[in-house]
Each structure stands twice: as structure tokens, then as C-alpha cells.
Amino acid sequence: MRRTTTSTDLVWTVGPAAEAVGTTVRALHHYDAIGLVAPGGRTDAGYRVYTENDLDRLRHVLVHRELGFALDEVAALLDGDGDDDDRLRLVGEQIERVDERIDRLQQVRAALETERGATMNGNRLTQADKRELFGDTWVENGEEYAREAEERWGDTDAWRQSAQRTARCTKADWAEVRAEVDAIHGRLVGLMRAGEPADGEAARAVAEEHRLHICTRYYDCPPEMHAGLGRMYVEDPRFAATYEVLAPGLAQYVSTAVQANAAARG
């Protein structure tokens, strides 16, 4: 229990002290043994007692431990071991760790919000819906594509923005998306078959429609990002096949048009 010594300091025995700062008796014994937080005194019977100053130090230790500091690093920070550069380096490393933790938690939160939104709004597509809207290939390989995309881009703002927007899409919305994509692809096929150069003004204009479609439906896609997607349309055989099934040579045509449009706007 808490008591008052002959001085004016309030002191705690080890159990109440541990409870006051939110740790365990075992942790206090360990901190005492390694000299990190020694109790301010002992009772006549030899029991540890902690003063207000001791508890303040304990709180600092626990805060630094929560941030990922090792005990020797905590001692260096609290006791001033090492020079200012060392302390700044340690603090800088911990700030980076905290930022990484915040980013991970934000990603988890965004995923949970997406899941909640899809569930609340009844926007989940059935397998039949997916087959109707996107075809057999996407239904058969969609989960694999999604996992790969998340591994590659899951920590980006574009991924989070796309997840939030698509979570709100109903089947009717997805039908509109599919119609928009089909129209863009149809115009590109028409230009290619008419002999319009892939880097010409007409093809670049449709490539810009494609970029704006991504910006509207999925995520902000600046020209340089769109150019990267254009390269992927020929470098990844799966994406190339999506265009080649529409018209032989279309993958390269689209890739060239997209990159030409990005260069013109860069």
C-alpha cells in the first residue's frame, strides 16, 4: 500500500508501484537488477520502495520500450551515455519504426473499412456476377492476380485509394466500368486497323481517356505512372494476352500510345 516516509516524498512498495505505472513486479525486479531503475530506498525489513521520481523514470522506460528501444538504449537515453549524435541517431531510428508501425496500422484500418463497406452496402459480387462482367479468365485467375497486385502495390496510396473506391461499387457500377473499358479498347482497335500511328495525336487522345478512366474509377494516375502501366502491358504476358485477344498487335499499340501520351504531357 502507499505510505509516507519521514520525508515528504510519497513512496510505493514494489507491488503498488508496478500497478501505478502499468507493468509487473517481475519487470521492476529486473530493472533494479540491471541498474536501470533502482528503488529510491528500502524499508527497515529490506523491501524496495519507490519515490515519485522513481515512478517518473519507470514511465519513461516503459514509453521507450513501447517504441521498440532495447534496454541498453533506454539507459543511454535516460542517463546521457554517449554523445548527442548517438542519442539523435537512436531517436531517429525509433521515429522511423513508429512511422512504419503507423503505416501498417493505417493499411490494416483501410482494409477493415473496405471490408465493412462492402458488407454493409451489399456490394459483394457473386462468382456468376464476376463471370458475367469480366469473363471466365478473370474468374479463374482473379484471386491470384489480386494477391500478386497486393504484394506488389499493397503499401501504396494508389492501392488504398482503389480499394476504398471499388468497395462502394455495385454490380451496376461494375457494368458501367466494363462498358467504359470496352469502348476505349474498341476505339484503339479501330485506330490501329485504320493505320493511325500509335504515337500519333488520335491514339494519344484515346490513351489519355484510358488514363482518366483509371483516375476516375480507381486511383490518381499521373502520366508517368500510366507510362509504367503501358510498359507492363507488353512485359507481362498476362496483360498482353488481354489485348491480343481483341486484336493481334494491340498490346504493343496500346503500350506505345500510353507512353507517347505520357511523354507529351511530361
Image (cartoon, helix red, strand yellow):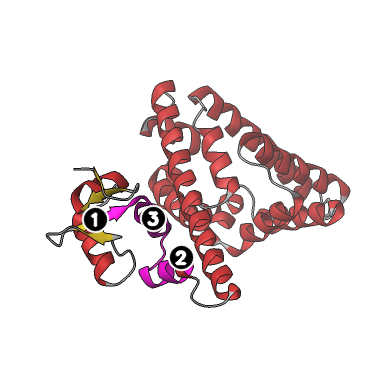
Q: Which residue is mark 2?
A: 78
**Number of other residues with Cα within 10 Å of mark 3, as a class: few under 14, some 14 to 19, many 20 or more:** few
Q: Is residue 66 magenta?
A: yes
> Cβ–Cβ below 8 Å for labels 1 and 2?
no
Q: Which residue is labeled 3 in the image?
A: 66
- Foreground pick, 6 / 141: 6
- Residue at the image point whose x is 37% and y is 34% from the top: 127
Distance from disc 3 to disc 1, alpha carbons, whole Å, reads 24 Å
Q: Position of residue 47 (x, y in %)?
A: 16, 59
Compared with 188, 179 (above or below) is above
Q: Earlier in the sequence, mark 3 or mark 1?
A: 1
Q: Amino acid at mark 3?
A: Glu
Number of numbered callouts drawn: 3
Q: Quick one: which residue is furthest to the left in this view? A: 45
Q: CA distance from mark 2 to mark 3?
A: 15 Å
Disc with the residue nearer the chain's start (2 vs 3): 3
| Magenta-drawn segment | 49-77
Q: Quadrant of the N terminus?
A: top left
Q: Residue 69 sits in which quadrant?
A: bottom left
Please name the predominant secondary structure of the magenta segment in the image: helix
Residue at left 56%, top 40%?
Answer: 162
* Circle nearer the viewer, 3 or 1: 1
Crowding at dot 2, Cα within 10 Å, few <14 / some 14-19 / many 20+, comes out as some
Q: Is residue 133 above or below residue 122?
A: below
At 19% from the left and 59% from the top, the residue drawn is: 26
- Residue with the mark numbered 1: 49
User: Do the CB atoms of the residues marked 2 and 3 lie less than 8 Å apart?
Assistant: no
| Residue 249 x, y percent position in the rendering | 67, 57
- Name which residue type carries label 1: Val
